[in-house]
Image (tube, rainbow, N blue to C red):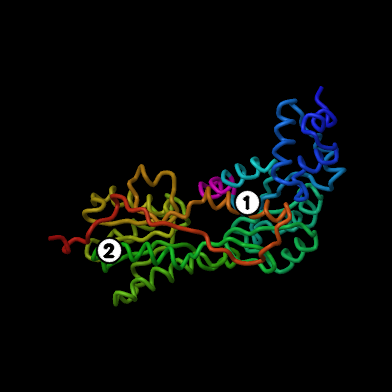
């Protein structure tokens, strides 16, 4: 059976150095860490998680807090974070943060009991706008934290500029000559989502204003960021042939896919009769040939995890809001506006 003494002898270092290297301590050089890891691999040595935790005060486990578990976006973020944490030698524990209004007791228990049990070394909060009391509770735990999705006081955060991505999506169809452009967004009453639905609507309206188009409230519909919600909203927008838009900007790819399916059910051709653009970079986007602003959620999860791991290994926390990248991906769901073609 492989022992820490055997690893130390093979690597030519002390057992204390082996312990520090395998625990990810910043006091061990990269060259020494690689030498120790290679020796451990050759001997098949795996450090005891319990012993390592007692010795170092670290659990080698990261807590990830999410408001929704069964969606493509959150699953993609989780995939990217899990890959980076695994590469860094960390486990991951997933916590579901229940809605404040519908499940206040469960939400309170998460902060009062579960997160306080010292099972994790640090936290990643994904698309969770915490109350002041919740944020104080996390800070009181003294654990590093990275936020993904919007600013959190005293926390390094990575955020997408929702105004800019919606403006870019809308500018794409205005550049194709569209002026009667509808928008499918989300409910704007929930203030625990960093106001994302409102910011995306404002980006859409800003792009219209830039080409001299006054936003028309009759061309706005609310979905629920699902394919079904986008389908229902698009049917309302497309039902009257006299008032139909020539393009739809959807605040998510799933709602955009729902709009494409609604158009098809009404006998409309995409993009000849109707252009559709979404926001996300959904894995089904290429199948539906959907033009989208890709926010690369797998990379978002990876970046959040790598930022947190850097803090855990000794890099000073930036305590700043860091912008996330995004890209316009043009496919066949958008085309020049009807009447603008040569």
Instruction: Please name the residue shown 67% across and 46% down the image.
Output: 94
Q: Please, what secondary structure does the residue beneath circle 2 have?
A: loop
Residue 74, magenta (yes or no): yes
Instruction: Please name the residue shown 60% across and 58% down the image.
Output: 148
x, y percentage for residue 130?
67, 64
Left or right: where 312 falls relative to 67? right
Left or right: where 161 falls relative to 178? right
Please count the marks in the image.
2
Q: Nearer the viewer, residue 35 or 247?
A: 35
Task: Provide the residue span drawn in magenta.
Answer: 69-78
x, y percentage for residue 199?
48, 69
Looking at the image, residue 147 lies above or below residue 78:
below
| Outermost residue to the left | 342
Residue 125, magenta (yes or no): no
x, y percentage for residue 171?
33, 66
Q: Nearer the viewer, residue 45 or 110?
A: 45
Left or right: where 197 falls relative to 150? left
Packing grade of label 1 (10 A; few <14, some 14-19, many >=20) is: many
Q: Nearer the viewer, mark 1 or mark 2?
A: 1
Residue behind mark 1:
306
Look at the image and tell me whether residue 57 can be seen.
yes
Instruction: Please name the residue shown 82% across and 30% down the image.
Output: 9
Quarter residue 319 falls in: bottom right
Packing grade of label 2 (10 A; few <14, some 14-19, many >=20) is: many
Looking at the image, residue 204 lies above or below residue 251:
below
Label for residue 245? Answer: 2
Instruction: Tell me the quarter of the image containing the N terminus.
Output: top right
């Amino acid at each position: 059976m492989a022992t820490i003494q055997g690893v130390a002898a093979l690597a030519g270092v002390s057992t204390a150095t082996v312990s520090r290297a395998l625990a990810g301590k910043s006091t061990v050089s990269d060259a020494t860490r690689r030498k120790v890891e290679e020796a451990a691999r050759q001997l098949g040595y795996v450090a005891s998680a319990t012993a390592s935790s007692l010795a170092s005060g670290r659990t080698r486990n990261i807590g990830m807090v999410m408001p929704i578990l069964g969606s493509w976006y959150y699953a993609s973020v989780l995939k990217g974070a899990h890959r980076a944490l695994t590469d860094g030698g960390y486990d991951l524990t997933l916590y579901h943060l229940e809605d404040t209004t519908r499940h206040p007791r469960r939400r309170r228990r998460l902060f009062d009991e579960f997160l306080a049990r010292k099972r994790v070394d640090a936290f990643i909060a994904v698309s969770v706008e915490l109350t002041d009391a919740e944020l104080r509770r996390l800070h009181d735990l003294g654990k590093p934290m990275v936020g993904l999705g919007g600013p959190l006081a005293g926390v390094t955060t990575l955020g997408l500029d929702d105004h800019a991505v919606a403006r870019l999506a809308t500018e794409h169809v205005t550049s194709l000559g569209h002026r009667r452009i509808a928008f499918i967004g989300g409910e704007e009453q929930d203030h625990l989502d960093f106001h994302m639905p409102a910011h995306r609507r404002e980006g859409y309206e800003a792009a219209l204003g830039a080409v001299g188009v006054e936003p028309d409230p009759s061309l706005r519909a609310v979905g629920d960021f699902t394919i079904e919600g986008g389908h229902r909203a698009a049917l309302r927008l497309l039902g009257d042939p006299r008032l139909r838009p020539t393009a739809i900007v959807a605040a998510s790819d799933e709602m955009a896919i729902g709009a494409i399916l609604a158009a098809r059910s009404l006998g409309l051709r995409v993009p000849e009769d109707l252009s559709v653009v979404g926001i996300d970079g959904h894995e089904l986007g290429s199948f539906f040939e959907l033009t989208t602003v890709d926010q690369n959620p797998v990379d978002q999860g990876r970046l959040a995890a790598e930022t947190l791991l850097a803090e855990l290994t000794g890099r000073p926390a930036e305590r700043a809001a860091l912008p996330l990248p995004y890209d316009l991906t043009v496919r066949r769901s958008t085309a020049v506006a009807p009447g603008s073609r040569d």
